[in-house]
């Protein structure tokens, strides 16, 4: 069990290091305000991301996605402040276990869960009127995933984070049943496939994620699909692929993807730092 949660935290940490590259094509229906905010967020310009998302919330107060991504900005700022995004934290599972207790910012925590709850309420209200509202299901999946990372990475309650990981996966599966072309949802299912494929069989049986096989090749296929066609989460998926390639000893592929991310996010110092480290491993 411990190995599972360590891997979950490991991937969550690197996820937060840089997302949403400019080069990923977006399908129809993407919200340009959210895309602009995410581009700033993953260039580590959290203040600009917050301003854009606050405008999105003001202009579309009933849309859950604005609140969800506003919570994401708070989470990533905290992960950055606590140096959880540093390569030394997630390069080795043992380092995650041994890291000293983190001092979370109480105000950031309050704001994070406030935005999570506001987003959830709006998504649930829309689903009550329209059970097949795709963006609302997507918002619920994102929210649960963000809480998984906050509880597991900052509060250090990896066992407690499991229920939120399952919730995020459940909403992603529900969404894909309604619309298999809602590509961003494959990021959640791809992550689940890789995590389950990285633990022993008896642990996989205990975890019991619905409709997940623990197939690492399927995980890569799902993530590559998101990189190619995701509305919002293409770089999320690209970061995950970097980690998978690195852990599977495919350093050349990892380096190639990091170079693309550095090109797309020139203001993100963590990406440059990780590229230097990976390049050094190949020499």
Image (cartoon, helix red, strand yellow):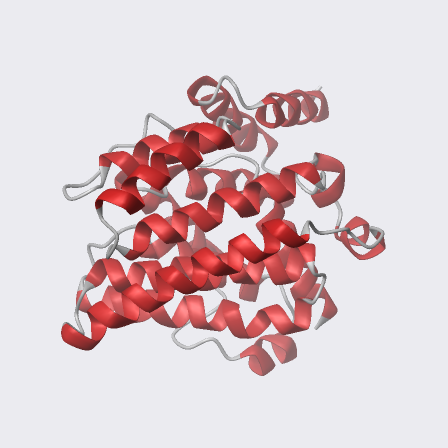
The residue closer to the viewer here, 42 or 77, is 77
The spot of residue 109 in percent (x, y) is 60, 55
Residue 70 image position (x, y, % from top left): 42, 46
Q: Nearer the viewer, residue 226 or 84?
A: 84
- The residue at the point 46 percent across, 64 percent down is 144
Q: Is residue 159 left or right of residue 174?
A: right
From the viewer's perspective, tell me whether residue 283 is left or right of residue 17. Answer: right
Image position of 253 with respect to 14: above or below: above
* Residue 208 picture location, percent across and down: 51, 80
Which residue does the image show at 50% across and 27% down from the upper left?
45
Depth check, front residue: 279 or 179: 179
The answer to whether residue 230 is visible is no
Residue at 45% of width from left, 17% of height from top?
Answer: 263
Among the 4 quarters of the image, the one containing residue 189? bottom left
Q: How many marks?
A: 0
Compared to residue 33, the image places residue 247 above or below, namely: below
Q: Would you identify the image quadrant in which residue 9 lies?
A: bottom right
Classify 124 as above or below 40: below
Looking at the rendering, in which quadrant would you find the N terminus? bottom right
Location of the C terminus by quadrant is top right
Image coords of residue 101 (percent x, y)? 82, 55
Q: Is residue 253 left or right of residue 277?
A: left
Left or right, 203 with respect to 96, comes to left
Is residue 206 in sight in this rendering?
yes
């Amino acid at each position: 069990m411990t190995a599972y949660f360590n891997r979950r935290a490991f991937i969550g940490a690197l996820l937060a290091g840089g997302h949403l590259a400019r080069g990923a094509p977006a399908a129809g229906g993407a919200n340009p305000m959210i895309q602009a905010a995410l581009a700033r967020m993953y260039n580590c310009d959290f203040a600009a991301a917050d301003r854009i998302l606050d405008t999105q919330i003001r202009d579309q107060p009933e849309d859950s996605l604005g609140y969800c991504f506003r919570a994401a900005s708070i989470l990533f700022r905290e992960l950055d402040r606590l140096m959880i995004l540093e390569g030394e934290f997630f390069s080795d599972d043992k380092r995650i276990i041994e890291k000293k207790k983190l001092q979370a910012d109480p105000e950031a925590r309050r704001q994070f869960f406030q935005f999570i709850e506001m987003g959830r309420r709006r998504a649930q209200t829309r689903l009550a009127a329209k059970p097949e509202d795709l963006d609302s299901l997507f918002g619920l999946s994102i929210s649960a995933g963000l809480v998984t990372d906050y509880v597991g990475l900052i509060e250090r309650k990896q066992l407690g984070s499991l229920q939120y990981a399952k919730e995020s996966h459940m909403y992603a599966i529900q969404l894909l049943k309604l619309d298999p072309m809602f590509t961003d949802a494959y990021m959640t299912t791809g992550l689940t496939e890789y995590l389950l494929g990285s633990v022993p069989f008896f642990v996989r049986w205990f975890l019991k994620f619905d409709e997940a096989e623990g197939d690492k090749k399927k995980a890569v296929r799902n993530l590559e699909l998101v990189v190619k066609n995701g509305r919002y989460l293409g770089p999320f998926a690209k970061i995950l692929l970097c980690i998978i390639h690195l852990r599977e000893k495919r350093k050349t592929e990892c380096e190639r993807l990091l170079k693309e991310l550095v090109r797309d996010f020139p203001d993100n110092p963590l990406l440059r730092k990780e590229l230097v480290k990976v390049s050094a491993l190949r020499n």
